[in-house]
Image (spheres, grey):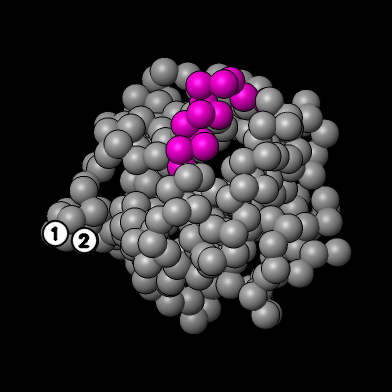
Amino acid sequence: MQRTLKALSALLTYPTADLKAAAGEISEAIEKETAISFAVREQLHRLLTELATGDLYDLQERYVLLFDRTRSLSLHLFEHVHGESRDRGQAMIDLKAQYENSGLFMSAAELPDFLPLFLEFASTLPAKEASETLGQPAHIFAALAERLRKRRSPYEAVFRALVALAGAKPKDDEVSALLELPDPDASDLAALDAAWEDEPVKFGPGAGDGCKDGLIARIRGALRPAPDMPAPRNLTTRS
């Protein structure tokens, strides 16, 4: 499962020339472990083909429209649980501590609930523990998969794979509750603005507007490199 989780983490990072070049290696990693069904692997290979052969600018634009501009598709897990509430701050602290206890350290620009980082962490755990860890946000994976299915996005396959790997299957009522939330199209600017409009939340003296700062952090987080690929200077260090 370790190689598969690293591969899925890579697929959810911001498209770069390095990611395009690694598409074949990622495909091999998925096939070697056969941790997920043939049908889902075939869907993942279609995404990999697009990443390998598509125009890089188009791939990057699609990624931003899906995962940065559309709140309902955010790759930050706590966005779907806590939004911008104060509870999110403590959850971030707890998750960061969990990473560091396992030897995974973040840069100051990263948020611990960024899904590629969460999957990188899970890939360091024994298979049973990794599966149990994935089970906790399984309802989020299922809801994201359904939203991407509606958009006919090949990224749906990544979330179908995560649901399949999760030790606990998502509960229908939890998935339905997420799917009832607003899910505007990326081209509907007014709806997107309304979805992101939140009352400012401060977590300490001098803290800025929670929504604005959170959005900037998300965009920075999207630049996290895929696991085992060269990291941009001053981004991420690991022990």
Q: Residues within 10 Å of mark 1 (few under 14, many from 20)?
A: few
Q: Is residue 239 left or right of residue 155?
A: right
Question: Where residue 238 sits in the image (x, y, percent)?
Answer: 80, 64
Note whether 136 is above or below 22 in the view shown. above
* Residue shown at the point (50%, 70%) measured from the top left: 220
149, 133: nearer the viewer: 149
- Disc 1, SS: helix
Kindly identify the amino acid type of the residue bearing the numbered disc 2. Answer: Asp
Kindly identify the amino acid type of the residue bearing the numbered disc 1. Answer: Ala
Q: Is residue 72 left or right of residue 235?
A: left
Q: Is residue 142 visible?
A: yes
**Quadrant of the snapshot with the C terminus:** bottom right
Task: Please report contact status of discs 1 and 2: CB closer than 8 Å, yes or no.
Answer: yes
* Residue shown at the point (52%, 37%) measured from the top left: 45
What residue did someone put label 2 on? 193
- Disc 2, SS: helix
Question: Where residue 164 sits in the image (x, y, percent)?
Answer: 57, 23
Q: Residues within 10 Å of mark 2 (few under 14, many from 20)?
A: some
User: Which contiguous range is marked in magenta?
Assistant: 35-47
Question: Where residue 97 sits in the image (x, y, percent)?
Answer: 74, 55
> As drawn, which residue projects farthest toward the front?
53
Q: Main secondary structure of the magenta part?
A: helix
Q: Is residue 149 magenta?
A: no
Question: Where residue 16 sits in the image (x, y, percent)?
Answer: 52, 65
Quarter location, residue 210: bottom left
Task: Give the total of numbered labels.
Answer: 2
* Residue shown at the point (24%, 42%) measured from the top left: 182
What residue did someone put label 1 on? 190
Note whether 128 is above or below 114 in the view shown. above
* Residue shown at the point (51%, 29%) measured from the top left: 42
Quarter location, residue 156: top left
237, 45: nearer the viewer: 45
